[in-house]
Amino acid sequence: MSVLDDFMRIRLYRKQAAEFQWLADNASIASVQRRYRAIARHYSELADREQRADKTRMAERLRQLRLKREEVAAQVRQSREANDNLAIGLLRLMQIRARRRRSLQRRWCSLQNQVRRSR
């Protein structure tokens, strides 16, 4: 059921309780007054229980939404960490390649110098 349905049901119970209370107040026979007041109390109790149940459902729904939000936040953090790790890995790879390139350049220069000396 929707929140609106719950709200309307609570209002209906309160309205019924008020009507039966009015009937009890205007009844001339004591036994009829007692019956109407008992019915009014039952409708009031139904309204109170519906309202408590609605609050409980809303609290549970909010708890579920909070848990979901925390799960998504954790996934985002993990995703960020994974992206950070990927970026760090790429930077390390670039550093390794740069070192290899410099090493190869030094060897090349060294070989060229040796060739020039031998001529």
Image: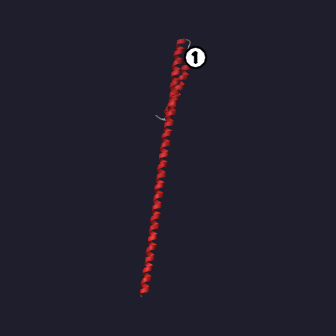
Q: For numbered disc 1, what is the local secondary structure?
A: helix
**How many numbered circles does the render carry?**
1
Q: Which residue in the rendered view is the most extreme toward the right? A: 25
Residue 4 drawn at (x, y percent) = 50, 34
Q: Quick check: 97 above or below 118?
A: above
The amino acid sitting under disc 1 is Asp
Residue on which disc 1 sits: 25
Q: Residue at x 44, y 72 (%)?
A: 101
Q: Position of residue 2 (x, y in %)?
A: 48, 35
Q: Image quarter for residue 90?
A: bottom left
Q: Position of residue 84 (x, y in %)?
A: 48, 58
Q: Position of residue 40 (x, y in %)?
A: 53, 21
Q: Is residue 112 above or below residue 38?
A: below
Q: How is the image coloured?
A: secondary structure
Question: Closer to the camera, 106 or 30?
Answer: 106
Q: Report the front residue among 79 and 22.
A: 79
Q: Nearer the viewer, residue 60 or 104?
A: 104
**Residue sitting at 52 percent across and 12 percent down?**
31
> For the C terminus, which image quadrant?
bottom left
- Residue, x 50% and y 25% (percent of image)? 46
Query: Dot 1 surroundings within 10 Å: few (below 14), some, or many (20 or more)?
Result: some
In this orientation, which residue lies closer to the viewer: 56 or 36?
56
The residue most toward the bottom is 119
Q: Residue at x 49, y 51 (%)?
A: 77
